Image: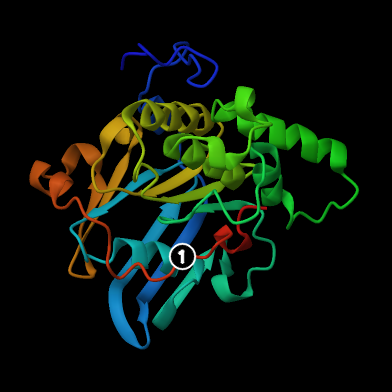
Amino acid sequence: MSDTGRKSQEHPDHSGHAHSRAHACQPLGDVVIAVEGGRFGYGGHSSASVARLEIRSGEVIALLGANGSGKTTLMKGFLGLVDRIEGKVELFGEPVERLQDRSAIGYLPQRQSAAGPIPVTVNELVRSGRLTRRNPLGLGRDDGAVQAAIAVVGLTASARKRVSTLSGGQQRRALLARALVGGSQLLLLDEPFAGVDQANQEAIADALDGLLHNGLTLVVVLHELGPLEPLITRVIVMDHGTIRFDGPIEQAPPELLHMGHDHDPHGGPEPTQGIGLVG
């Protein structure tokens, strides 16, 4: 992947490591998401169902499917953000409904806006991702974590700028930093490239590539693989609310990788602050 046009403060040079699945050679760790007999939806109507699914530490999973296939609903089902009509979900071995400490989980919704009615800087936005940390006196460590997260997404030069002055792609990167600042071990991204130009897509891919070598588990809802394709190790394809394919990306039929390019109409309303999972 060429770095042309991205070697600046706002598009950092990560030429020291090329996008690859090298991390896939590492042994997988413990189960971080487990679903048994899960049916998820809204108002009692099922939009996504899974007989059995396990996601292990270190996996990089693309959740694909056509418009309305239920991929966003399934991701929200993992997090307890939609009705669970049947079955059970565990995160890090705990039932999702009883999980108290969610600081290890980062979540970037599909339609979350970074520019709200109250003007905030990039620093302030990212710092809000530390609010659920049980460390009220650890301001020094918070400062370091905030600056590190901003650096990962290549926005250090814009840290003091108001979020509203940034481009749409830069705002998406700021939201990604917010999702990362809690020290996430599990990161769930719903259409991270929606409305983002190519340069910012590649900057996001660069940031994620660097994090994967630290054992991050990544689940991404995508309508096309784009710059993340070299990082993906496993593909789950949703079709009419059920899993049509689940396996290594190398074994996925090409036609299933390009099933749809629209957003999931069953996505439902988005939480405005990432449901507190980013702290």
Residue plotted at (55% across, 36% down): 165
- Outermost residue on the right side: it is 137
Residue 42's x, y, as percent?
37, 81
Amino acid type at circle 1 is Glu
Nearer the observer, 271 or 83: 271
Residue 219's x, y, as percent?
41, 49
The local secondary structure at tag 1 comes to: loop
Residue 204's x, y, as percent?
44, 32
- Left/right of residue 243 with respect to residue 162 in the rendered view: left
Q: Is residue 58 above or below residue 242?
A: above
- Left/right of residue 6 with respect to residue 131 in the rendered view: left
Residue plotted at (60% across, 45% down): 178
Residue 182 seen: no
Nearer the observer, 59 or 73: 73
Residue 60 seen: yes
Which quadrant of the view contains residue 4? top left
- Left/right of residue 275 with respect to residue 145 in the rendered view: left
- Outermost residue on the bottom side: it is 44
Residue 190's x, y, as percent?
39, 53
Instruction: List the residue tagged with mark 1.
Output: 270
In which quadrant of the rendered image does the N terminus lie? top left
